[in-house]
C-alpha cells in the first residue's frame, strides 16, 4: 500500500504547537523526508522532537500548520495517513500484564490485519528480535532492552511504510544496540523510511543519511549527514601505539596522549597524515592501528544548538585541548 | 481498513482482560449476591411477606441481577479504559486507523460482556435460593443488553475524565450505588408516598429494574414503553458524549 504520487514520506510545513498554559513547543517547523530515507531528528531535551512525532502520529493536536504522510494530509485523510506509520515511542506504552503474543496480534488487528496473518507476523518479528522464547510471558517480565525490541516488533505488525523511532536504544546495552542498528538497517534496505530521534549521536552518524536538528521549537539545521559533517574542517583520529618510553612531541598538529599506548590527533583538512607518521617514526614510535573518533557529530550538534559556527569552534576547542 | 477486525481485536482484548483476572471480576459478585439472598431473602424476606404479588425473594431476584449487571458493566470499562490511559497503551489504538466509534463500541462491548456474564452467574446462584419464572424472555434480553450498554458508556466517560484511580471510584460510590439502592431493587416504588414516587421517577435505574422485573414476573411500577424510551435516551446521549470526547481527544491527546 503506497501512494505512487508521493515522493515524500513526510512533509511538514509551518507546524506550530502551543500547549495549554501557553508553552509554545513548536514555532513553525518545515521538514521533508523522502521515501526510503534514514532520517535523524536530533535536538536537546525539550526541543520539540517528541511533540513533532506526537503531531505526526496524532497523539498531539497541532495548533497550526500542515502534515502530510505519503501525500495524505492528517487533517483530511487521517486514517489513511496513520496506516503508513509505525511508531516506537520513547516510553513503554503497552499493557504490562498482557503476554507478548496478545500485544502483537491485537495491535495488528487495530490495523485490520486478520488473526492468521498477525500470528505469522508476530512469530517472524519475535524471532528476528530474539523474543520468541518470551512470547507467552507478560510484558512486565521483560528486561528494558527486550521491552524496546517488543515495541519495534509491535510497530511493524501492520508492515508500515514509515517507521518512527523516538529514542529506541535509550538504556540499551551496546551489544543489543548494535543488533538493533543492524535490524533497522535491514528494514531500511527493504525500502522502509525510518525517522529516528536519539541521544546517541554516534547512532545518528552511523545510521542516518539525512538529518534535522531542532532546538527551541525551530529547525536549526536540515541537510544530509555528509554535508553536515563536511562543515567540520577538523577530524580526530585515535592511534594505538606500541608501548613507548620517551615523551612524544608533534609539531603543527593538535594531539593528546591518552595513556602509554593511545594517542589522539586532530587533523585539519589542509593537513595530511604523512607528516604525523613521519614525526612519530622519527621518534621511534610504532603505530599499530588507527581509527576515527566518533565525536564529529557531537561537536557540530553542541555548536549548532549553541548558535556557534561549528567548524571554527571545533577547531578552537581542539586547540585549547591540544598540548 | 477492516473495521470489523479492529472491533473484534478490542473486544477480544477486553474479554481476555476480565477473564484473566476472573477471581477479581467474576467471583466477588457471586459471593455478594449470595449474601444478599441469604440476608434479605431468606432471613429478613420471610418476615416481609409478599411484594408486588410475589414472595419477597422472587421479587428482589431481578433487581439483584440488574444491580450486578449495572455495577460490572460500569466498573469494567471505567477501570480498563483508565488503566489503558494510565499505562498509555490506549495510544496503541490512537495511532492506528481505528475509527472512534470502533473504540467506543469495543470498550462498551467488553463492558457488556462482563455485565451480562456476571448477570448469568448471579442468575445461576439465585437458582439455589428460588425458582425463577420467565414472563417475556425478549424483554429480559433487551433490558439487560441496553442497560449494560448504558452503564458501559457511563464508565467510559468516567474513565476519559479520570485523572487518577480515585476518580473512577467517586461516581460509583456517590452516585451509582445510591441510585441503584433507591432504584426499586428491594422494594416497589408504589410503597413510597406520592412525592417520593415522583422523585423516584427521575431515577433512570427505576425504569431499568422495573423493565427487567417485568420480563421475569410480568409486573412493573412503570410503563415498559416508557422504560425503553428512557434507556434509549440515555444510550444515545451517552454515546454522543463519548464520541465527542474521544474525537476531541479530551484526556487522551495533548
Image: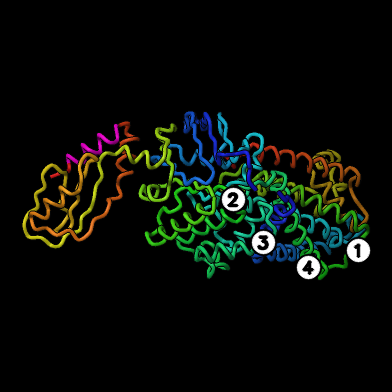
Q: Is residue B95 visible?
A: yes
Disc on the earlier residue, 1 or 4: 4
Disc on the earlier residue, 3 or 2: 3
- Disc 4: which chain? B
Residue A160, numbered label: 2
Looking at the image, residue A210 lies above or below residue A96: above
In 3D space, how far apart are the residues under numbered discs 2 and 1 (Cα atoms)? Answer: 56 Å
Q: Which residues are magenta?
A: A309-320
Q: Residues within 10 Å of mark 2 (few under 14, many from 20)?
A: some
| Residue A311 among magenta residues | yes
Classify mark 1: helix, strand or loop: loop
Residue A290 relative to residue A108: left or right: left
Examine the image and state in which quarter residue A302 appears: top left
In this view of the protein, which residue sits in the foreground, A180 or A7?
A7
Residue corresponding to mark 1: B133
Residue corresponding to mark 3: A117
Asked whether disc 3 touches disc 2, contact meaning CB atoms under 8 Å apart, the reply is no
Give x and y (percent) for residue B6: 70, 52
Query: Are the residues under badges 1 and 4 in a single subunit?
Result: yes
Q: Residue at x 25, y 38 (%)?
A: A314
Residue B111 relative to residue A163: left or right: right
**Of marks 3 and 4, the one in the foreground:** 3
Give x and y (percent) for residue B126: 81, 66
In this view of the protein, which residue sits in the foreground, A202 or A26?
A202
Residue B125, numbered label: 4
Amino acid at each position: 500500500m503506497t501512494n505512487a504520487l508521493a515522493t515524500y514520506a513526510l512533509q511538514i510545513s509551518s507546524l506550530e504547537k502551543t500547549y495549554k498554559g501557553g508553552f509554545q513547543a513548536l514555532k513553525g517547523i518545515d521538514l521533508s523526508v523522502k521515501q526510503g530515507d534514514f532520517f535523524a531528528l536530533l535536538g536537546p531535551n525539550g526541543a520539540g522532537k517528541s511533540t513533532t512525532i506526537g503531531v505526526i502520529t496524532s497523539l498531539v493536536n497541532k495548533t497550526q500548520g500542515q502534515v502530510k504522510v505519503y501525500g495524505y494530509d492528517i487533517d483530511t485523510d487521517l486514517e489513511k495517513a496513520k496506516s503508513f506509520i509505525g511508531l516506537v515511542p520513547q516510553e513503554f506504552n503497552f499493557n504490562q500484564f498482557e503476554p507478548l503474543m496478545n500485544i502483537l496480534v491485537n495491535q495488528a488487528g487495530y490495523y485490520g490485519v486478520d488473526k492468521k496473518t498477525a500470528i505469522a507476523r508476530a512469530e517472524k518479528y519475535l524471532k528476528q528480535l530474539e523474543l520468541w522464547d518470551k512470547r507467552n510471558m507478560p510484558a512486565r517480565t521483560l528486561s528494558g532492552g527486550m521491552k524496546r525490541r517488543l515495541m519495534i516488533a509491535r510497530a511493524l505488525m501492520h508492515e508500515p511504510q514509515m517507521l518512527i523511532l523516538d529514542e529506541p536504544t535509550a538504556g540499551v546495552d551496546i551489544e543489543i544496540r548494535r543488533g538493533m542498528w543492524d535490524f533497522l538497517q535491514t528494514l531500511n534496505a527493504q525500502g522502509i523510511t525510518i525517522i529516528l530521534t536519539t541521544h546517541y549521536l554516534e547512532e545518528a552518524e552511523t545510521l542516518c543519511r539525512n538529518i534535522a536538528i531542532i532546538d527551541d521549537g525551530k529547525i536549526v539545521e536540515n541537510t544530509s549527514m555528509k554535508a553536515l559533517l563536511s562543515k567540520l574542517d577538523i577530524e580526530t583520529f585515535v592511534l594505538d601505539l606500541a608501548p613507548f618510553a620517551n615523551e612524544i612531541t608533534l609539531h603543527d598538529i593538535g594531539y593528546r596522549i591518552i595513556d602509554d599506548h593511545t594517542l589522539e590527533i586532530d587533523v585539519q583538512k589542509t593537513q595530511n597524515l604523512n607528516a604525523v607518521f613521519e614525526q612519530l617514526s622519527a621518534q621511534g614510535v610504532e603505530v599499530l592501528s588507527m581509527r576515527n573518533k566518533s565525536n564529529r557529530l557531537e561537536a557540530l550538534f553542541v555548536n549548532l544548538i549553541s548558535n556557534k559556527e561549528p567548524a571554527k569552534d571545533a577547531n578552537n576547542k581542539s586547540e585549547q585541548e591540544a598540548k | 481498513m477492516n473495521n470489523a477486525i479492529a472491533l473484534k481485536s478490542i473486544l477480544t482484548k477486553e474479554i481476555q482482560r476480565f477473564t484473566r483476572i476472573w477471581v477479581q471480576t467474576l467471583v466477588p459478585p457471586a459471593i455478594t449476591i449470595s449474601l444478599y439472598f441469604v440476608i434479605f431473602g431468606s432471613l429478613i424476606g420471610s418476615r416481609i411477606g409478599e411484594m408486588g404479588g410475589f414472595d419477597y425473594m422472587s421479587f428482589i431476584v431481578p433487581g439483584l441481577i440488574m444491580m450486578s449487571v449495572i455495577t460490572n458493566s460500569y466498573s469494567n470499562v471505567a477501570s480498563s479504559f483508565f488503566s489503558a490511559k494510565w499505562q498509555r497503551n490506549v495510544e496503541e489504538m490512537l495511532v492506528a486507523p481505528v475509527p472512534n466509534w470502533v473504540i467506543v463500541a469495543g470498550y462498551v462491548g467488553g463492558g457488556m460482556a462482563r455485565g451480562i456474564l456476571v448477570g448469568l452467574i448471579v442468575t445461576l446462584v439465585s437458582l439455589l435460593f428460588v425458582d425463577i419464572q420467565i414472563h417475556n424472555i425478549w424483554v429480559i434480553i433487551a433490558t439487560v443488553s441496553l442497560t449494560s450498554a448504558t452503564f458501559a458508556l457511563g464508565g467510559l466517560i468516567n474513565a476519559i475524565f479520570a485523572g487518577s484511580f480515585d476518580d473512577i471510584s467517586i461516581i460509583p460510590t456517590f452516585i451509582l450505588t445510591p441510585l441503584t439502592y433507591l432504584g426499586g431493587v428491594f422494594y416497589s416504588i408504589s410503597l413510597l408516598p406520592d412525592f417520593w414516587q415522583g422523585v423516584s421517577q427521575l431515577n433512570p435505574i427505576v425504569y431499568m429494574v422495573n423493565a427487567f422485573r417485568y420480563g421475569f414476573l410480568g409486573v412493573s411500577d412503570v410503563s415498559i414503553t416508557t422504560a425503553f424510551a428512557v434507556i434509549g435516551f440515555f444510550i444515545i446521549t451517552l454515546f454522543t458524549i463519548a464520541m465527542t470526547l474521544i474525537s476531541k481527544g479530551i484526556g487522551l491527546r495533548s
